[in-house]
Amino acid sequence: MEESGGGAEMKRMKMKVMVAIDDSDGSLYALKWALENLFSVMTSMEDDATSSENEGMVFLVHVEPTFQNYVHAIGPAFYPAFVVVDSVKKAQQEKSVVILSRALQMCKDKLVKAESVILNGDPREMICQAAEQMQVDLLIMGSRGLGTLKRAFLGSVSDYCAHHAKAPILIVKPQEEQHKNHS
């Protein structure tokens, strides 16, 4: 019996997991859940935690939306689209770095090997494509806890991925207190 339990632990430790990260509390909670529930075995086995052969891997994926180029009127002047777009892109890149740095630190604190990737495009499609290209064992996403009506109008990235991703997907619902705050 011990051997089969040990085999399950080894499989869990070698798992390639992708966690979709954005600026929501839900995505960071999903990462925290994954680190505590899927990778906690790594920190309890000191000898194997240093062996890259036995380590699991977390891919942190953040998707920045693409911008359309238009001429923008700002006050009485018109600014060429590239000036505005470049400014917005720079701010977006800085925000992405902050978000992923926080997520990478969470992985480092749990001694879990992680890599981050920033993609551009529609988050729904890019997350599904990345999960397929990286051949992950599991895609983990947070849920913002949108109600039925809001989800119907705004759409849901996690709902889209649940129906279109080729990898198994785990949607981590928000903690009860977070869910109440967003209702």
Image (cartoon, rainbow, N blue to C red):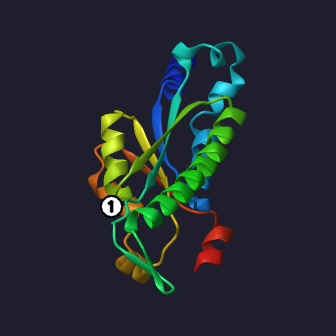
Q: Position of residue 84 (x, y in %)?
A: 46, 67
Q: Is residue 22 visible?
A: no
State the residue at coordinates (46%, 58%): 86
Type of amino acid at the residue the image marks with label 1 = Tyr
Q: Quadrant of the C terminus?
A: bottom right
Query: Does 180 appear above or below 69?
Result: below
Residue at 67% x, 29% y: name it. 111
Percent position of residue 157, x then y? 39, 62
Residue 49 seen in render: yes
**Residue 47, picture quadrant:** top right
Rendered-image quadrant of the N terminus: top right
| Quadrant in the picture for residue 110 | top right
Q: Position of residue 73 (x, y in %)?
A: 43, 81
Q: Is residue 67 left or right of residue 14?
A: left
Give coordinates of residue 98: x percent, y percent.
63, 50
**108 relative to 129, above or below:** above
- Of all residues, the one furthest to the front in this rendering is 77
Instruction: Name the residue tied to disc 1.
Output: 160
At a point 47% along the width and 81% down the height, the residue shown is 77
Q: Residue at x 30, y 39 (%)?
A: 132
Indicate the quadrant where residue 2 lies. top right
- Given the current orientation, which residue lies at the most extreme bottom position? 76
Secondary structure under badge 1?
helix
**Dot 1: within a 10 Å radius of its alpha carbon, few (fewer than 14), some, or many (20 or more) residues?**
some
